[in-house]
Image (cartoon, rainbow, N blue to C red):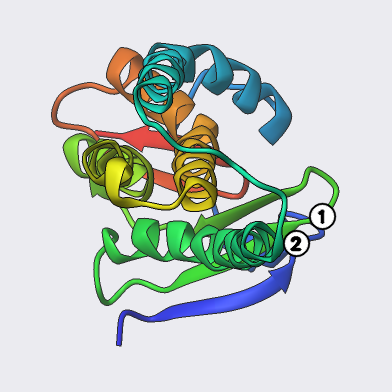
Amino acid sequence: MFNIHIKGKFENEAQLLQGKELSQKAVQFKEGRTLLEAFRLGFVLSLPIMLPMVILSVIRCSELDKHLEFDGSLIVAIVITVLLRQVLIYLHEFIHAIFYPKEAEKTVWKDLKQGAYFVYCDAEVTKIRFIVLCLAPSIILGIIPFFIWYIVAPILEAEWIICIMVLTWMMTFMSMGDFANVYNAIRQVPKNAKVFNHGMHSYWIE
């Protein structure tokens, strides 16, 4: 329906490029040469979001009269959380993909060397749309669920308070690379330019 395909193991850029040429007018983002370098920048950019979440979590948990016990219920909650995390990792990429043009091909890959999942699409999108598609997963899977958790925490059992809290942290924190892309787009891309991917790098063109 949305032209999204799961490709599996990523090995090299040739899998993404499929012989497509890069326009001479395209300008590459000033970004890291590898995903790891982008994650370093994203880590710094995520701190203003993650630190308040952690602080609010500690405050919220301290307000609740709950006691965590190591029993069967905790083990079940941990197992479900681990499985749900894996599902949400793919959902994270699907959310990115949905915000690209419907007719464009989107492929989901796993980079085993760098331990990262990513969606690839070389369709040109506006600067605003690029920023939105980058931020959408962290907002939908991390930030909004965190505030819902904050509200409903008093009615949850202790094991689910912890597991859901940690899950919202992970879904926000795993968007480090997305935060780096947003930062680069805001600082580098002209207002009316289009943004697109070519291999493992992002470019803009007017």
Relative height, residue 201 to residue 183 (above, below): below
Relative height, residue 49 to residue 14 (above, below): above
Is disc 2 surrounded by few (<14), some (14 to 19) or many (20+) residues within 10 Å? some
Which amino acid lies under the numbered mark 2 shown in the image of this protein? Phe
Q: Kindly give the residue lying farthest to the left in the view shown.
A: 192
| Residue shown at the point (82%, 59%) measured from the top left | 11
Residue 112: which disc?
1
For residue 34, what is the image quadrant?
top right
In the visual, does 12 lie left or right of 38? right
Q: Kindly give the residue lying farthest to the right in the view shown.
A: 113
Which label's residue is closer to the chain start, 2 or 1?
2
Q: In what element is the residue under mark 2?
A: loop
Pointers 2 and 1 in contact (CB under 8 A)? Answer: yes
For residue 151, what is the image quadrant?
top left
Q: Nearer the viewer, residue 21 or 103?
A: 103
In the visual, does 112 lie left or right of 177? right
- Percent x, y for residue 148? 24, 45
- Percent x, y for residue 25? 39, 34
The C terminus is located in which quarter? top left
In the visual, does 61 lie left or right of 119? left
Which amino acid lies under the numbered mark 1 shown in the image of this protein? Leu
The N terminus is located in which quarter? bottom left
| Residue shown at the point (47%, 24%) measured from the top left | 180
Is disc 1 surrounded by few (<14), some (14 to 19) or many (20+) residues within 10 Å? few
- Percent x, y for residue 193? 22, 33
Q: In what element is the residue under mark 1?
A: loop
Q: Kindly give the residue lying farthest to the bottom in the view shown.
A: 1
- Percent x, y for residue 21? 55, 55
| Residue shown at the point (52%, 41%) measured from the top left | 162
Residue 10: which disc?
2
